Image: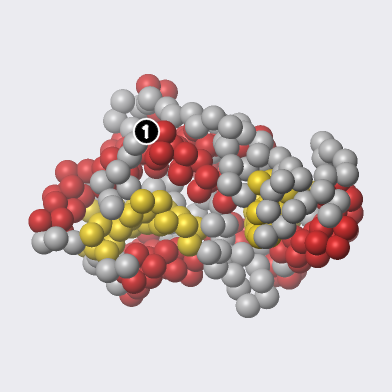
């Protein structure tokens, strides 16, 4: 695997791959890699792509400077994981390479509607930072396909809308959430958990499964979510949000929807964890609003 740090080097290697008639696959990351990231690499390689990964801890998407400062930087370990997975090229720029005019003078991108509420409500400006950096990376790499994990379901929705609205010539390819054997969604932030918190953390996915079961039985969104918030708090979490949204555009669910997604975010210790669970082929009944 080749590692480059500048846009010029990146484009030269991608140009050579494209001249050899290779399809370009791209996996953007912030590093501190785990098997979930590697599953994206494997999906790209499985599609016979010349596979490019990026590692860049993007300051524009952090609303908390302390969170940005403590985010793990593990480049050497990440390089080894990517090389062993068969990744062809790693782009690992620094902040000056990505934002040469400075962050305050950077043109930013706002994606309306799908970026609002959920994580967008809890982290103001987060998805503007995500959309901006992903747009820049897509323009730098110019891939045919870009692969994103479905654990960050709202992020995928934001990126899809941005790509559609700005007519970017890339296919966005979501990949199912990678989970540990006990169901916990793999996340770089799991490293913040103590051993006891790691055991408790499985409660988030269990809660989503319980919401799904209750929802199928009673078809009452308000009831399912109210009971679930109480259980999640009892399991040691500080609930950020639990919501049921329409899968297609993340609008509030309505009686006509036959595909909805349960989305949750909660804090345990220092870690903020997110997860989701899709429910297909349903007609839901809204008995009360969920505020």
Q: Residue at x 32, y 67 (%)?
A: 47
Tell me the quadrant of the picture where the C terminus can be found.
Answer: top right
- Secondary element type, mark 1: loop
Question: Residue 90's spot in the image, x, y percent?
Answer: 28, 58
Q: Is residue 199 above or below residue 67?
A: below
Residue 110 is at least partly visible in this image: yes
Q: Nearer the viewer, residue 264 or 286?
A: 286
Query: In the displayed structure, does residue 121 sit left or right of residue 22?
Result: right
Q: Quadrant of residue 218?
A: bottom right
Q: Residue at x 54, y 30 (%)?
A: 112
Local crowd size for mark 1, using a 10 Å CA cut-off: few (<14), some (14–19), many (≥20): few
Residue 233 is at least partly visible in this image: no
Q: Residue at x 57, y 57 (%)?
A: 151
Q: Nearer the viewer, residue 254 or 65?
A: 254
Question: Residue 131's spot in the image, x, y percent?
Answer: 45, 37
Q: Quadrant of residue 33?
A: bottom left
Q: Which residue is mark 1?
A: 166
Q: Nearer the viewer, residue 287 or 47?
A: 287
Q: Residue at x 68, y 75 (%)?
A: 182
Tell me the quadrant of the picture where the N terminus can be found.
Answer: bottom left
Question: Residue 36's spot in the image, x, y percent?
Answer: 49, 66
């Amino acid at each position: 695997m080749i590692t480059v740090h500048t846009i010029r080097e990146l484009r030269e290697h991608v140009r050579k791959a494209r001249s050899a008639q290779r399809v370009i696959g791209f996996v953007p990351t912030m590093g501190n890699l785990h098997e979930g990231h590697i599953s994206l690499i494997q999906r790209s390689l499985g599609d016979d792509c010349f596979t490019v990964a990026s590692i860049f801890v993007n300051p524009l998407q952090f609303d908390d400077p302390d969170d940005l400062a403590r985010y793990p930087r593990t480049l050497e370990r990440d390089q080894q994981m990517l090389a062993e997975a068969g990744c062809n090229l790693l782009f690992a720029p620094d902040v000056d390479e990505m934002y040469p005019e400075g962050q305050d003078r950077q043109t930013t991108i706002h994606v309306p509607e799908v970026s609002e509420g959920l994580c967008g409500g809890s982290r103001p400006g987060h998805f503007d930072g995500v959309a901006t950096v992903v747009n820049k990376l897509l323009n730098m790499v110019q891939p045919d396909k870009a692969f994103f994990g479905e654990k960050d379901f709202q992020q995928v929705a934001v990126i899809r809308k941005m790509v559609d609205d700005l007519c970017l010539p890339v296919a966005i390819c979501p990949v199912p959430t990678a989970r540990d054997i006990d169901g916990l969604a793999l996340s770089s932030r799991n490293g913040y958990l103590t051993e006891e918190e790691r055991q408790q953390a499985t409660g988030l996915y269990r809660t989503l499964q319980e919401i799904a079961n209750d929802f199928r039985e009673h078809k009452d969104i308000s009831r399912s979510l109210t009971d679930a918030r109480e259980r999640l708090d009892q399991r040691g979490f500080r609930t950020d949000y639990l919501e049921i949204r329409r899968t297609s555009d993340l609008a509030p669910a309505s009686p006509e929807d036959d595909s909805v997604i349960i989305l949750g975010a909660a804090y345990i210790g220092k870690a903020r964890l997110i997860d989701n669970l899709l429910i297909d082929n349903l007609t839901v009944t809204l008995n009360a609003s969920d505020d």
